[in-house]
Amino acid sequence: MSTPSKFRLELPQSRVGRTLLGVSLLQAIIVIVIEAVVANIVIPKINTQDLNDPNRGLPVYMMIFVGTQIWNMYLSWDAILKQNTIQLIAFVMFNACTFAYSIFQFRQVNQADVAGGPLLYAVSVVLGAFTLIFAYLAYKLYLEFGWKIYKKIGADPNMKNMFRYYQVFLTLLKVDVFFWLAFSIQYLVLVLKQEDAEFVLTIVSIPFTLMILITAVYGLRRESKPVMASFVAGLAFGIAYFVFKIVRIWTLNRERLYGTQLFLTFFAALSIVMLVMTFANSIVCMLNFGKGLKSHITTAAPSVSPAKVDNPVRSTLV
């Protein structure tokens, strides 16, 4: 007799959590459909291989914008399941930043002088409205998670601070992945050619980087100083890598980078900022090794009935 598959998509038990996840899915569907319609109008009129076309990066930027919707859905789902209040806040901020960029994207498409730009008004309206909804739902979950985290780690303020740094670390890793991928995609498509040595190195670096980040989570949860020390060294290398990329962006053949320098520099600079923050937070987490947090983060959180989430102690926990 064949055994049934153990794979099961885990959904939030909380009603508010399921609502936030459903709203996140609805936003993603609406935005992706509108972006697909606009892309179908815009992309055929832009030659990404024409180095003299200042709009040649627009299809890539639109693809990354669609990717933010998928990534934001993952952030919300993971934050709810892991009861990560820091990631929940990051999710709302990330959506707000996406809303801000949607306004800029509208100007980009209009400057490209192609039809379809007005449709992007709807994207900005949708993102702005949904960001307000997310903020409300995230606040409700923040209160709910406060009580659950209290049941998990207790009321010790030192333990709460260590747990908060642990949550920040996990959130920073996810944000690092996004900016790394966004930069790499732009650099591969808009700058490098297949015959360039950097082309292969950039492709190889993507899965290698993901493996390092996964190893870092293991090292933190198991409080392995050798693993975390290696990760911190890798972060220093990553910072140097993006500094090198910025120098390359502004010293490489200007024709190859026409119309893409500012965006590439923007994503590289953001990546450096996030890596520096991850570096500092990693050091703090390592200093907290051996102080009792490990036993709390390697055991499952106890279930809490919906009636208990209204406990008045909840607002002081996280």
Image (cartoon, rainbow, N blue to C red):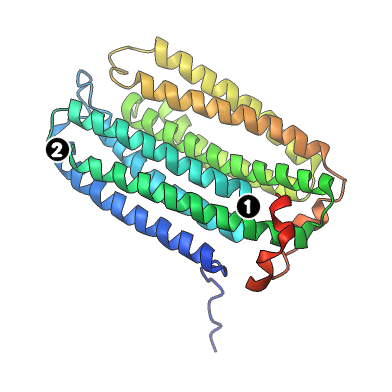
Where does the image place residue 251, in percent across and percent down from the top left?
41, 10
**Along the viewing direction, whichever of 95 and 254 lies nearer the viewer:** 95
Q: Does residue 149 appear in this view?
A: no
The residue singled out by tag 1 in the image is 84
Res. 312 visible in picture: yes
Is residue 158 placed above or below 140 in the rendered structure?
above
Determine the image quadrant of residue 51.
top left
Of 128 and 118, which appears nearest the observer? 128
- Residue 245 is left or right of residue 221, and the answer is left
Give the secondary structure at mark 1.
loop
Left or right of residue 140, residue 281 in this image:
right
**Label 2: element kind:** helix
The tally of labels here is: 2
Quadrant assignment, res 106: top left
Disc 1 residue type (three-letter): Asn
- Left or right: residue 260 compared with residue 96: left
Question: In the current view of this chain or complex, which residue is farthest to the right?
Answer: 291
Answer few, some or many: residues within 10 Å of disc 1's Cα (few below 14, many 20 plus, some between 14 and 19): many
Residue 183 screen position, x and y as percent: 43, 31
Residue 44's tag is 2
Q: Earlier in the sequence, mark 1 or mark 2?
A: 2
Callout 2: few (<14), some (14-19), or many (20+) C-alpha neighbours within 10 Å? few
Residue 224: image location, x then y, percent: 79, 44
Residue positioned 55% across, 23% down in the render? 241
Q: Position of residue 287 (x, y in %)?
A: 82, 36
